[in-house]
Image (cartoon, grey):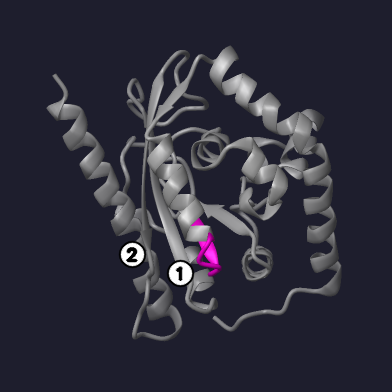
Amino acid sequence: MDEAPLSAEDRAALLRQARLGWLAFPIVGPGAVLYMRCLRGHRIVGMPAARRTYREALARGRPTLVCANHLTMYDSIYLHHGLAPLTDYFFDFRRFAWNLPAVENFTSSLFLRSLVFLSKCIPIDRKGDAAHHERVLAQVRHVVREGHVCTIFPEGGRSRTGRVEPDNVTYGIGHILRALERPQVLCAYLRGERQRTWGEVPAWGDTLHLSVQLMEPTTGHTGLRAARDLARQVIGTIKALEDAHFSRMMAKP
C-alpha cells in the first residue's frame, strides 16, 4: 500500500482540534479522573511502573504508538490515566494520545461527539471504504510524525471472547509502523479483576491491572508482508502480557 499524502485542510483541522482539546483539558481531564476514581470506584494497579516506562519512552524522541488489548468502550480513558498524571498532559499535550473510536459508538449523542472531538479522537468507520481507511491511517502517521502519540487497538474492536486473539489482528498498525522512521510501540495490557468478557465499562468498584512493555518492531519484508509481520509482532507482545497477567492472578493467594 502506497502512502497517501494528507491534505493541508486535514493537517490544519488536526492542529485546530488538538489546540481546542488542550484548552478544554482543565475540565475534561479532571472530569474523567473523577468519573473513574469516584463515580465508578476504580483503581489501577501497576500505574507507577507504567508511567515510568511511558515517560522514559517519550524522552527518546521517537515516533511512538500505544497498542493495547480492548475489552471495554472506555479503555482509552483508563489508559490515559494509567500512563501519565494530568500535569504531564497539560504541560505537553502531545503526550495525551490520539485515539481511533468507531463512529457507531458516539454519533447518537451530541455530548459524546463533543467529548470525542475534545479528547483528540480521529473517528473511524469500520464499514467505510478503502479511501476512508487510508485517510485515517494518513492522519495517524501525520500526528505521530509531529511528535504526538496515538493509541491503537490492533484487534480492531472489543474482544468478544475476553482474550487477545492474535488471528484477528488488523494490519492497519503494520501499515502505520512501516511508514515511520524507527518507531517504538508501548504495548499495554489492561484488565479488571472482575472482567470476564467484553463490555461497555469496567464493573463498578473493580480493580484494574495495567502492565506495559516497550518494543521496537522491525521487519525485513516489504509491502503487505511487512505490514503483516509488524502487526503480528505487536499483537504477539500484547498476548504475552496477557499470559503473564493470568499467571500472576493464578499465583495470588
Residue at 69% x, 51% y is: 92
Find disc 1 in the rendering and name its residue: 174
- What's the distance in space between the residues labelled 2 and 1, CA to CA? 8 Å
Q: Is residue 253 left or right of residue 133?
A: left
Camera-nearest residue between 123 and 144: 144
- Does 121 appear above or below 184? above
Residue 95 at x, y = what percent?
A: 62, 52
**Residue 160 covered by magenta stretch:** no
Q: Position of residue 89 (x, y in %)?
A: 66, 44
Disc 1 packing (10 Å; few <14; some 14–19; many ≥20): many
Q: Amino acid at mark 1?
A: Gly
Q: In this view of the protein, can residue 143 be seen by the observer? A: yes
Query: Position of 70 compared to 209: left or right?
Result: right
Q: Amino acid at mark 2?
A: Arg
Give the x, y percent position of residue 140. 63, 64
Q: Main secondary structure of the magenta part?
A: loop
Query: Can you identify the residue that label 2 sits on?
Result: 232
The image quadrant where one finds the N terminus is bottom right
Q: Residue at x 55, y 40 (%)?
A: 76
Q: Which structural element holds mark 1?
A: helix
Give the camera-side residue of 228 and 83: 83
Check the image and report above or below for 105 versus 154: above
Whether the residues at callouts 2 and 1 have beta carbons within 8 Å, the answer is yes
In the rendered view, does 64 fall on the left or right side of 133? left
Query: Between residues 140 and 31, which one lies in front from this camera angle?
Result: 31
> Quarter-wise, where is residue 203 in the image?
top left
